[in-house]
Amino acid sequence: MTGEVAIRVRDVSHHFGEEDDARHVRALLDTSIDVARGELLCLIGPSGCGKSTLLNVVGGLLEPTTGTVEVAGKPVRGPMPADIAYVFQENALFPWNTVFENVMLGMLFQGVPKAERDDRARRSLEAVGLAEFSDHYPAQLSGGMRQRAALARALSLETGILLMDEPFGALDEQTRMILGEDLSVLLSRTDKAIVFVTHSLGEAVFLADRVAVFSARPGTIKQVISVDEPHPRNPEFVTSAKFTALRNQLYSLLHDEIRKAMSESAMRGGAGHRGSVAGDSA
Ligand SMILES: Nc1ncnc2c1ncn2[C@@H]1O[C@H](COP(=O)(O)OP(=O)(O)O)[C@@H](O)[C@H]1O
Ligand SMILES: [Mg+2]
């Protein structure tokens, strides 16, 4: 990693519930990572290994059981709306508001003055290619367009940090690919630090500057792989030998962990977590 550190995670562990409770879960174990400004870090790992937990700890939505997180040089002790914006898988747009109003609302909660809100909403909708759909309601948009709207809302907040939890996870493969390409263009123009959770190996290699591979629960970062390729990434990158080699490397790292996660889950007699990496193309 090069550049100024935007997010510093040190020895973070997180447990849900009390030690002596049967429902006690060790979700995250002794995890440390830095994310630089201008860098996109992908988190990939078996389902239930603590990726969302780490994201929520970084975002100040969960207090870690042990360890520390610093964002922009400040210790995280709760939500930091001036520094951190979120995009979730299930878009959190208000159905009764238009796309434009939805973007405006995010800034209203952040306390941005009206005139500036207007200007930023226009610019961020432009940036994600939704300017013409400003007056549409979420129900009138495709899933991909709704995720673009959610991204526009996050961009309009002009935070240094963007946390994205499987933002394209509910979309079909083609839509996902196009959104990935467009995000790579946005990345080339920003110095935000982005943490992006995905279960798609191809998406991770295409978008990430580095990919952190998690171990099975209790999750911790098992290995970090660099993808040394400037943004915006060319769509042809997907067909290159370099891309394939990185994807294969991720596949074998992940495959071992998914097996471990599934056998652990079977031993507990649980229904098990979805652990498939098959059917995952670019
Ligand atoms: N609020 C919660 N209470 C209890 N257990 C939880 C809670 N949230 C997550 N977990 C458990 O913690 C583990 C990690 O969850 P999560 O971070 O959501 O995994 P991932 O995002 O990698 O799929 C899982 O076993 C999950 O069931
Ligand atoms: Mg998750």
Image (spheres, grey):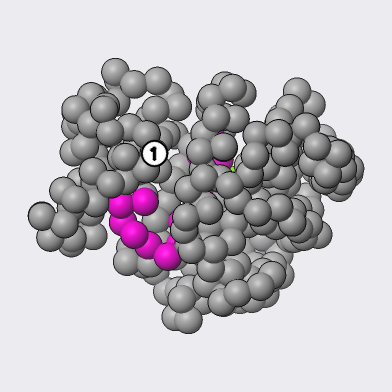
Q: Position of residue 54 (x, y in %)?
A: 59, 59
User: What residue do we see at 28% from left, 47% from top?
Assistant: 123
Q: Is mark 1 within 8 Å of ligand 2?
A: no
User: What residue do we see at 66% from left, 73% from top?
Assistant: 2
User: What residue do we see at 19% from left, 27% from top?
Assistant: 135
Please tell me how many numbered marks the rendered image carries: 1
Secondary structure beneath dot 1 equals loop
- What residue is disc 1 on? 128
Which is nearer the eye, 47 or 272? 47
Report if residue 179 is visible in the image.
yes
Q: Position of residue 28 (x, y in %)?
A: 67, 60
User: What residue do we see at 34% from left, 21% from top?
Assistant: 141
The image quadrant that residue 260 belongs to is top right
Q: Is residue 226 above or below residue 31?
A: above
Asked if residue 153 lies left or right of residue 193, the reply is left
Image quadrant containing the N terminus:
bottom right
Asked if residue 175 lies left or right of residue 143, the reply is right
Q: Position of residue 228 (x, y in %)?
A: 74, 56
Q: Position of residue 252 (x, y in %)?
A: 89, 42
Asked if residue 97 lies left or right of residue 272, the reply is left
Magenta segment boundaries in residue numbering: 155-168
Image quadrant containing the C terminus:
top right
Which is nearer the eye, 233 or 28? 233
Disc 1 packing (10 Å; few <14; some 14–19; many ≥20): many
Badge 1 amino acid: Val
Report if residue 47 is visible in the image.
no
Q: Does the magenta run of residues contain 181?
A: no
The image quadrant that residue 272 belongs to is top right
Asked if residue 253 lies left or right of residue 29, the reply is right
